Amino acid sequence: MTEDQRDCLQEIINVAMGQAGESLARLIEMFVKLGVPSIHLASTKDIMPKLKNMFGEQHDSVTAVRQMFNHNSGKLDIQGEAILVFSQSSLAEIEALMVNHQSQALNNRMEFLLNIANILTGVSIKGIADQLDSNFNCSPPSLIGMNISTEQLQSQDPINWHEALIIEVTYRLEHQNFTCSLLFLMAGDSIAKLLSALDDFLEQL
Amino acid sequence: MSIPILICDDSLVSRKMVQKSLPDGWDVDISLAKNGVEGLAKIRQGLGEVVFLDLTMPEMDGFQLLEIIKKEQIKSLVIVISADIQPEARSRVLKLGAMDFIKKPVDAKTLAASLKNFGLL
C-alpha cells in the first residue's frame, strides 16, 4: 500500500466513521468524539502477532462480532469479513452505557452489543462502498464470542485470513473512553481490487 | 487583491478535494496545514483570512483551534468541513464562532453556496 493509497483510504474511512459515529450518538444519546483511524495492511503471518499486540494474550482478552460482506453492484467487486473487536475494558464501558440507556427495546446485553456492532460495522461498510461507487450486501452481525482469547478470533475464520486490513478506530465519549478495532479480512485479489479502486479515486482528484 | 485562504486538514486527499471544490476564478492565495498547530501558525502569519477547517486531526483538532481563535479574537472566517456529522458537532462549532459547517465529502456546489451566503463570492 502506497502512502497515497493509505491517505485516501484513511479519508474514506474517516467519512464512513463519521456516519457510524452519528448513528452511535443517536443510539446512546451522547456526543461521540471521533479519533483519527489508523490503518495496517497485514499479511497472513503478521495478523496474529499484530492482534496479540493490540489486545493481549489472556484467555478472556476480547469480545468480537462479525459481519460478512460481498459485492452487490458498482465498481468494487470484493468480498470479505468484517470483525469488530472490543477489548475487555471497552466492553465494560459499553456495559456502563447500557445501564444508563433508557430504551425498552434494548434491554439485554447481547442485543445492545449486536446493535452497536451493526452500527459501527454496517454503517462503516456502507459508507466506504458509497464513496467508491459500490454497494455491498451485508450479513446480520453475529457474535464470535464474549471474553475469548485473541487466538480464538482466528479459529473462527471462514475465509482463511488471507490478508487483513486492520483499522483501529477510537470513539471517545464525554466521560468514558472506548476503543474498538475493525478488521476487514479479504482474499488477496479483493485487497488488490480495493487498492486499484483507491488509485482510480486518486486519479479523479 | 487575492484573499489568503487556509485549508487545514490532516489528509492530503481531503486537502485536494477542498482545493478542487473551490469556485473557478475565485481570487485566492492558498495555504495548507496538516493539523491545528500548523494551522494556527499560518493564521498568525496572516495566511488564513478564510479557513476551511477539518475537526478530526492529530496534534490539535479543529475544536481546539476554534477555541483559540475565539479566545484570541482572531478575525479569520472559518468554515468547518468535517466527517463528524452529529448535530451536536455542528452546534458546537457554530457556538465556537465557525460561520458554517459543511459535511464531507465536500462538493463544489455546497461550498460555493456557503461562500455566497457569507458574501465571500
Image (spheres, coloured by chain):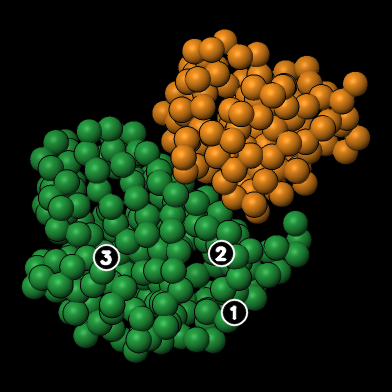
Chain colours: A green, B orange
Residue A86 shown left or right of residue B9 in the figure: left
- Count numbered badges in the picture: 3
The picture places residue A134, in percent across and down from the top left corner, at 59, 67
Mark 1 near mark 2, Cβ–Cβ under 8 Å? no
**Foreground: disc 1 or disc 3:** 3
Q: Pick the residue in front: A171 or A29.
A: A171
Q: Quadrant of residue B3?
A: top right
Q: Which mark is on residue A6?
A: 2
Q: Which mark is on residue A193?
A: 1
The picture places residue B115, in percent across and down from the top left corner, at 74, 26
The reply to whether label 1 and label 2 mark residues of one chain is yes
The reply to whether label 2 and label 3 mark residues of one chain is yes
Q: Which label's residue is closer to the chain start, 2 or 3?
A: 2
The picture places residue A16, in percent across and down from the top left corner, at 49, 53
How packed mark 1 is, by other alpha carbons closer than 10 Å (few <14, some 14-19, many 20 or more), is: some
Q: Quadrant of residue A193?
A: bottom right
| Residue drawn at (44%, 69%) of the image | A40
The amino acid sitting under disc 3 is Met
The amino acid sitting under disc 1 is Lys
Whether residue B60 is visible to the viewer of this picture, yes or no, is yes
State how far apart marks 1 and 2 are (Cα): 14 Å
A176 relative to A185, above or below: above
The reply to whether label 1 and label 3 mark residues of one chain is yes
Mark 1 near mark 3, Cβ–Cβ under 8 Å? no
State how far apart marks 2 and 3 are (Cα): 20 Å
As helix, strand or loop, the secondary structure at mark 2 comes to helix
Q: Quadrant of residue A46?
A: bottom left
Which quarter of the rendered picture does the N terminus of chain A lie within?
bottom right
Q: Which residue is mark 3?
A: A54
